[in-house]
Image: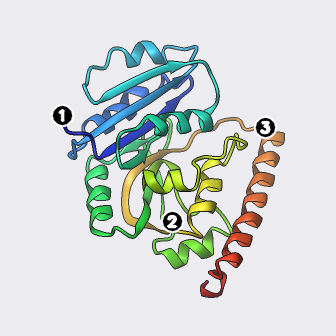
Amino acid sequence: MKKEPLVSVIMSIYNGEKYLKESVWSILKQTYENFEFIIIDDGSTDETLNILNTISDLRLKIISKKNTGLTKSLNYAIGIAKGDLIARIDVDDIANQERLAVQVDFLIKHPKVALCGSWAKFIDEVGNEIGKYKVPINYSEIKHNILLHNPIIHSSVMFRKKVFNQVHGYNEKYRYAQDYELWGRIVPKYEVINLPQYLIKYRKLDTGITKSKNLTVRWIGLKIRCLILLRLLKKKLVKKL
């Protein structure tokens, strides 16, 4: 009988040809090997799909579909995932070679922890390190900081699929900040932590974000913080902050 993977690594791509190979190979070269790698080509119009089709690895599962956006694509991928643990990676980012091994080991040893993220090193367009980002580590710090900003790096997380399902996944009403909104439903109910290790390289790009989009994202963040506060008050967790 074929052994099912413990981990499902999830990536959704829309026109990500520039950094695709480096990001994908950072997962395929992990020291931990019991995983599947589900990549959604979300209706790309560049060479993304052609590049993906040149990569040969039995753990790789490529699904090409019409464009529906990141949130719906992630829900779809996790819905078909076989692993009990879900790891996220974005096409711009690069995983440390030990990333999966470190996170799997931690979650196995700490069954009450629902999600673990990590610190990140910032890199520029050509991969030069330009800074470091240390997010809060323990649960108490994360509960405090989540009321101020997003304290969990999306591309660094590994979480339990059963918890994801219990909170009903990503909210498809959110085109932006879908990760922050999801953490806002997980944190009041389950213990989460960030490992004090640099397990990913996070690429900081000049995306040319418009003023209107920036205002939209800020408004969504404020809305999420208000919803999180209400949930924490309901759970009486704010007193511990």
Give the colour scheme shown: rainbow
Residue position marked by numbered label 2 in the rendering = 135
Q: Which mark is residue 210?
A: 3
Front label number (2 vs 1): 1
Assign a secondary structure to mark 2. Answer: loop
Residue 22 in the image: state x and y as whole percent.
Answer: 37, 31
- Please name the amino acid that badge 1 sits on: Lys
Instruction: Write the residue at 58% across / 14% down.
Output: 45
- Please tell me whether residue 103 is drawn above or below residue 8 in the rendered image: below
- Please tell me whether residue 161 is drawn above or below residue 35 in the rendered image: below
Residue 92 in the image: state x and y as whole percent.
Answer: 49, 36
Assign a secondary structure to mark 1. Answer: loop
Instruction: Write the residue at 31% across / 51% down.
Output: 99
Q: 134 and 106: which one is in front?
A: 106
Whether residue 130 is visible, yes or no, is yes
Residue position marked by numbered label 1 in the rendering = 2
On screen, residue 40 versus residue 6, left or right, reads right
